[in-house]
Image: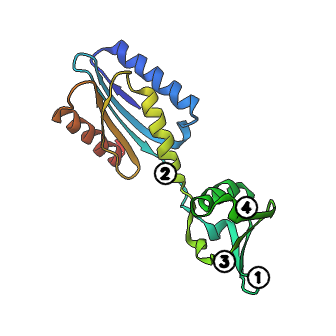
Amino acid sequence: MLVECYDERGAEVYDIIIKQVFQDLVLGASVDDLKAYVNPDDPVFVLAIKMRKTSNVILFEDVANLTYDKPNDITRILIDNENYLPHILKQLWKQFSRDEIYQPNRYQLEIEGDYTELKSIVVDDPHSNLQRRIYDAIFRILPEGFKNIKDLSSGDIVAVVATDELIKDAWIEKCHEYIDELNKGM
């Protein structure tokens, strides 16, 4: 982790703030590296964070069995992994009302009609979840009042430039330098 600032004390303070936010959000083990640039004279904050690799997306068929009972015109969903039940329900509630989903027990759901195509729906995306948590951390770390934010994130790197003025090209270049360094593992 590198916090770059002409003021050594300012760099130490932001180092402490970043570590505290990461500790509060339990993100330490999920991040490979971080680079930050702070300049109070030129009100700018550049932050680039490299996320660790996450597991693959979880599909419906990975955590549940879907079968269609043709005589009764019901799709039965048998939950294989109860940990994903909230995720499954969330996805189903996007398509169906709560009244359309019958839950006779905690491991079974039923929907009228043939909905076996649901098996290919993404139930959980660990990469997006981690990315969301890192954005939460960034917004806690950014100085208050820095409302002009440019998101330069790509792939496994979440990167932003923030200021309370117009964003300068030099700051965007600085952020791209950090992204390149993080991609190369520097």
- Against 141, residue 79 (above or below) is below
Mark 4 = which residue? Answer: 81
Mark 1 or mark 2, whichever is nearer to me: 1
**Circles 3 and 1 in contact, beta carbons < 8 Å:** no
The mark found on residue 113 in the picture is 3
For the residues labelled 2 and 4, the Cα–Cα distance comes to 20 Å
Please name the amino acid that badge 4 sits on.
Asn
Assign the N terminus to one quadrant of the image.
Answer: top left
Q: Earlier in the sequence, mark 3 or mark 4?
A: 4
Which label's residue is closer to the chain start, 1 or 4?
A: 1
Which residue in the protein does label 2 denote? 128
Q: Secondary structure at mark 3?
A: loop
How far is mark 3 from mark 1, CA to CA?
A: 9 Å
Q: Residue furthest right?
A: 105
Q: Identify the mark nearer the N-term, 3 or 1.
A: 1
Q: Determine whether the residue tagged by mark 4 lies in a helix, strand or loop.
A: loop
Q: Are marks 2 and 3 in contact (CB under 8 Å)?
A: no
Residue at image coords 56%, 72%:
120
State the residue position of label 1: 72
Identify the residue shown where x is 36% and y is 45%: 185
Q: Nearer the viewer, residue 176 or 132?
A: 132
Q: Amino acid at mark 3?
A: Gly
> Could you tell me which residue is drawn at 47 percent across and 39 percent down?
134
Q: Would you say the residues marked 2 and 4 are in contact, meaning their CB atoms lie under 8 Å apart?
A: no
State the residue in front, 181 or 166: 166
